[in-house]
Amino acid sequence: MKKRIGVYICHCGTNIAATVDCEGLVRFANTLPGVKVARDYRYLCSDPGQDLIQKDIQELSLDRVVIAACSPRMHESTFRNLLSSSGMNPYLLHIANIREQCSWVHQDRIQATEKASQILRAAVARVLGQQALTPRKFGIQPSVLVVGAGIAGIQAALTIANGGMKVTLVEKAPFIGGHMAQLDKTFPTLDCSSCIFTPRTVEVARSQGIELLINSEVLEVTGFVGNFKVKVQKNPTFVDFNKCTGCGDCVEACVLKKGTPSEFEEGMARRKAVYIPFPQAVPLKAVVDKESCLFLSRGKCKKTCIQACKAGAIDFEQKEEVMEREVGSIIIATGYDPFDPHLLPQYGYGVYDNVITGLQFERLSSPSGPTQGEILLKDGTVPKAIAFLHCIGSRDENANLHCSRICCMASMKQAHLAKEKTGADIYEFYIDINAFGKGYQEFYKRVREEGIYFIRGKGSEIFKRNGRLVVAAEDTLLGTPLEIPVDMVVLGTGLTPRRNAERVAQIFGISRSADGFFMEAHPKLRPVATQVDGIFLAGCCQGPKDIPDTVAQASAAAAEVMSLLTRGEIEIEPTVATIDPELCAGCKLCIEYCPHSAIEFFETKGISSVNEALCKGCGACAAICPSKAARQNHFTQHQVLAEVEGLVT
Amino acid sequence: MSDIFILVEHRQGKIRDITYEIFGLAESLANQQGTSFTAVLLGHDVKSFADDLSRRAPKVLVIEDENLEHFNSVLYQKTLSSLISKYQPSLLLMGHSAFGMDLAPSLSVEKDFPLVTDCIGLTFEEGKLKATRSIYGGKVNASVSLRESKGYIATLRPGIFPPKMHGEIKGRIVMEASPLEGGVDVKKFIEYIEAPITGEDITQAEILVSIGQGIGGPEHIPMFEELAIRLGGTISCSRPVVDRNWLPKERQVGISGKTVKPKIYLAIGISGAFQHVTAMQGSDTIIAINKDPRAPIFSVADYGIVDDFQNVIPILKEKISDMK
Amino acid sequence: MNIIVCVKRIPKTAEADIFIEKDNKDIKKDNLVFALNDWDGYAVREAVLLKEKFEGEVIVLTVGPDESKEVLTRCLAMGADRAIRIEEPIPNDGRLIAETLAKVIQTGPFDLILTGVQAEDDGWGQVGVALAQILGIPHASIVTHIHIEGGKAKVRRELEGGLEELLEIKLPAVLTIQTGINEPKYVSLAAILEAEDKETKEMTLEEIGFSPREPLDATIDQVSFPPTGKRAEILKGTPDEVVGQLTEIIKRKKGS
Amino acid sequence: MKIDPKTFTKDYLLHLCIQCGTCTGGCPVKYRSPLNMRRLVRETYFTDPFPSLSKRAEIWACTTCSTCSLRCPSGVKNVELLMAIRNYLANKGEVPSTIRDALENTLMQGNPWGRFRDRRADWAKALGVKIFGEATSETLFYVGCAPSYDPRVQRVATALVKIFQNAGVDFAILGKKESCCGNEIRRMGEQALFKKLAKDNTILFKKLGIKKIITTSPHCYNAFQNEYPDLNLPVQHYTQVLVHLIETGHLHFSKELGTSVTYHDPCFLGKQNKVFEEPRKILASIPQCEFMEMERSRERSLCCEGGGGRMWAEGGTEGKRNAEIRIREAVSLGAKTLATACPFCLLTFEDSVKTSGLADQIAVKDIAELVDETTK
């Protein structure tokens, strides 16, 4: 049956009409086989323009449409919608790009028109062979996996749970809160971190919608957007949380006298083998650390903890358990690791007691910390002079190239706290002050007003002279070298990707940017999405952030997840690959070449088949398939060849 | 055999020591040759010199001419040339000094007399002049024989031949007419320039701490100055140190610098070239510190230390300070 | 102002161990390094400085074997414009060298001739002054400063005892240059490599039409090591001990 | 080989400098001279200081210890820039007279002190050392200039020979044929001369069929290891060799040292070539050797100022020498011996020990000497 094609040529104002003879093009179109009608119009994308096409479709019962206008990136969707709303299958449309590919790049009207008509001829030839395609629909699991229970994970989890959806919140540590739980006060408002944070952690514990899995890690993720299958391993705490009251008797009883450095206290204090991470910990339960526990590590211990526990909660029989969850979407909020200053030996970290990191200072300054918030030297005395060094491990070829964004403000906040608590002389060694956020510059001003000395020069090295620490640097504004004796040095250590970032990236099939943090789908327009549909990012795992940005991004991720889940089902573009079971020889070449692992092999039938949900329609399989069994919908060999012939004849 | 001529060297109203050193040699050569020797005195107002010379030389030829007041090679050469033509001396002796070096080579060419310079030994063998010269920076001596000739010219190294400081003979003083008609304008004497004395006068010092190129670089000089002060002396040096502008000219000990005779001469990093040695060998006690055991300085020094000065001076400085 | 500088390649003996050839006529030289005569280095530098002031050309001239080319190259690297080497079939006799140089110099125009006061090796200190006599132009030896003004040069000569004399001398003239007259510049290997492209003319005695006459003014019969005179008493021991003895000596002699 | 300052920015990445001053702040001569690396980079990048450069003594104050380059957060090649500036000056002949001597001496006699080439192996006469030409070996013990001529450092070379001999190491030295490695020559700005030395030495080593090189000095080690384009032979500093000999039981200690020792990391061995452990391992294995670590050790070791041609540079610096500061550090630590593993460090320390009058409180030794004393 003869095809009935409608050809529409857009002037795009003068964008096209100025260089291409549109009337001429209409006359030419009419000469082409199968063309029922050809028209030109100033703006086809405008409502009148669309009405004109719709009218033709209905009155002339067209079965193919060619739009000669701008790039399909601009308006393909517009006209596809037009077709469907006019009762046609949207995939019977083809766009001939005579703007970007013709009028914009040529001056000569004759030649431009000639080229335009070739493009048009090709389009018409192609559209003849196009077939109606219908998108596949899939259901969506109304549940979410949030990985990491720092401020980012918690914010996202709560937002989603409060929206009425189930969240599984997985945390590697035996408590939730991440780094924010370690902070004393927060810049620039100086409100106490735990005061603003604890309510959220408690809320997590209470929330009906949140399944909290502490001491747990994600092992494996399979499936696709809307239908992910997740394997989570819960590591034993050797304490039955249902029984444990968090009384701490076991901690008292533990025989590990000198204890082991406390992770939460950044090594500024020591803990027993069985311990409660910190007073406001959620969950407030004791946990046993199997590295330091004499019984678990060496098998010999009186197990005084068991005797001490009235609730009988200690259970050395506990084993890892692996559980499966089905979720529609995933948010990764695995956070950051602070930079390890051992890597820059010139700062004597690990050599000198009173050279500490910013996070260690937070613990010193925290009322719940080892010194109840007093800023003290290792020997218990109060420092008379403190130096804060910026950019340690950031903006540094020898460590990390990126700016960690928060250190300037953190250092200045710590400087303020130190001044307030000790009255010491305080020096800030900086290269540039990065006070980018709301109220930050004001805070910078305030700190200067407080009489803290700012020295524009990076700390070169730290050594000891006459028992005192000396910071060597240059005052680059005066051009004079300095050696300033101090009692304590706080290294403004930067934020780095988690040590296990690579493994996590593999598990979730996402990629990392050059700085090692997880990569977003688009740095500006899709900052929380990854290139894997249904997996989103929140917080510092995507790049250094302060708390406001982290919370904002977490909320954004939650919103993305909600908008996805509330759809109930998702449509998958029909422009995917299919494998003709008749032709497939089962050579598996396509499986090897598929970048999205969207092709499975069915041993029983001995053939491969495409999982349309995972297929991104890249066409790799169609190109590689030796037996021409793999076909790429909407880009069939026949269609493409027709287009090519149209161009060359 | 005709006379041996000695060209008298004088400057600023003084006969220079080298002249007396030549007398000694001339006398022995003359005796060897069975001939006599003549002192040739050119100058202006030099009668007084003539008398002094006539006590040492059997004959003194004097030419008085105001143009000869100051040494000028051109005028001296003219004058000597005519005297030579007249008296046909077998040998003309002069010092290997700024004076002789500027005159001898050109005169030898003019008269076609073979020239031997900077001699440390001189003798006649079968009428031929034979000389000993110190070459390769004093590392070897060379005995040189000159071709047969009716006349020779030789310049003698200062400080080698024992001076003949006094004599009792009554030599004849013969006044000659000056062959010069006025001066010349190709080469004019203008004036003498004394090296400015800005610091202490090293010729007056009782103790000299004298440094050579061997100290490596000027950064060590303060250390030596301090040592000198502690010793109650002052600092002097050898030529290369001046050439390198580490110390001013006035501090230079050497033929072209100052001749010194301190009680103690401490030579540090000085190899001991003769130009230097000649000017300090009069010191009462010479102590040399040098890395190189073969340095010639050790053959003039009374005491020697073979070591890097850096191993010695610092300790010495300490020891000296508690010495007083 | 065209300046001719006569230079010589000499063996460096200050640091070296010296051995005497079997025929006792000279020292062994195969183990020695050769270089540009120190005095001549100052002369070339002075010529280049004058050229920088008055323009013109600096020509370096040497009488010597093939190897002498290396010192000419050095001079070119120091800023001389071209170089001439006269192949040396004649013994190292000052008078003959002067005559040979004169032969070449007479062929071209020049305003000034510089030589070193003497050579480091045999130290005759004869060539420059003899050359002037042969060319029939005035000379000044042991020059420590040159100031040129209209066809005349005011030069300072170094005398004894730190004294100098100021002379005025008509150009063209021969000046023999004393060390320290200027601050020598470092001659980088890069500069030397570049200088290898500059012109060096090689000539034989035939080409310059000069035949050395016989016999020579002076010939070396033999060389020998100088008799070692009295030697210093060498203080022995550790630096401390040595200094101990030394301070004693100083105390003693100071008192006396 | 023309030096064009216009390419400095590109060649030494001056445009990357963020003017943080890390270089100047950590510079060992920051108080000893007006040298300010940060400003120099800025000037070279932004203005054109070259006409005035030759008048700046501080250009010759840098010890090329490379602390600045190693720490620079922007990867600016400060030291290479400084060497290029020196090269620019050297090609114009504008170098201090003492540097001039050192360079000319090296061209003539193959060593910066201008000592007689034929005497280069005099120190080894009585030791029965194999010399290439008369004998052969696969292993070259490259002695170096200071160990060949300086009486103090000759003791180190001698100690090493004795150690190798009694550990049964087969090796030979080059004798008169040995020439300066050129490491300091390059740092004094004589790139062309360095290239010549590198070329000649490489050809000589290959011709003699040398398979492996051991050096006394970290500076020679650095040159062979990192800066000889066509050498590609395994090079070891002697400390690396000694550790191996001790660990493989070829070297037995027969005496007790019975004193306390601290160790100064030479810049060209430690910072620049990351050889930190070997010297400490050796000291640890010496019987009765009480090892004390100095305040500033390893990467933070304070340069002794012996490198980069400062052995020959005249002044350009004032105030207390780092070597003396270092000595005082060691003394206050209570160490009776300050050990190092570099001829230049050894000489600067020996010098300072005397000038500072601390000779009776502490001895300066090379690790090789300590091993020799306790193994014979």
Image: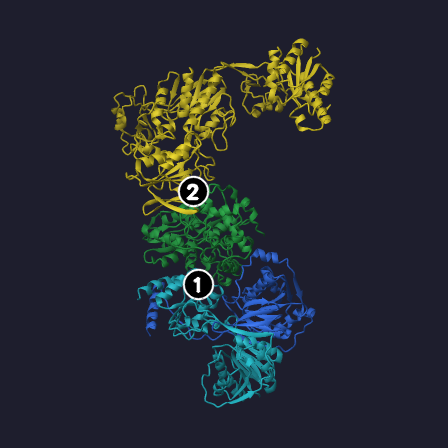
Query: What is the chain letter for disc 1?
Result: B
* Disc 1 residue crowd, few under 14, some 14–19, many 20+, Cα 10 Å: some
Chain D's colour is: green
How far across and how far down the image is residue D220, in percent? 48, 52
* Disc 2 residue crowd, few under 14, some 14–19, many 20+, Cα 10 Å: many
Foreground: disc 1 or disc 2: 2
Q: Nearer the viewer, residue A23 or D164?
A: A23
Q: Is residue C238 visible?
A: no
How far across and how far down the image is residue C103, in percent? 66, 71
Work out whether D158 lies above or below D273. Answer: below
Which residue matches tag 1?
A: B215
Q: Nearer the viewer, residue C158 or B267?
A: C158
Which chain did the renderer colour cyan?
B
Q: Tell me, yes or no, whether dots 1 and 2 are on the same chain.
A: no
Work out whether C131 lies above or below B43. Answer: above
Amino acid at the residue labelled 2: Gly
Could you say which quadrant of the image residue B268 lies in?
bottom left
Amino acid at the residue labelled 1: Ile
Chain A's colour is: yellow
How far across and how far down the image is residue A183, in percent? 36, 30
Chain C's colour is: blue
**Relative side of A324 to A299, left or right:** right
Q: Secondary structure at mark 1?
A: helix
Which residue matches tag 2?
A: A457
Work out whether A39 lies above or below B322. Answer: above
Do labels 1 and 2 touch, CB within 8 Å? no
Q: Which mark is residue D194?
A: none
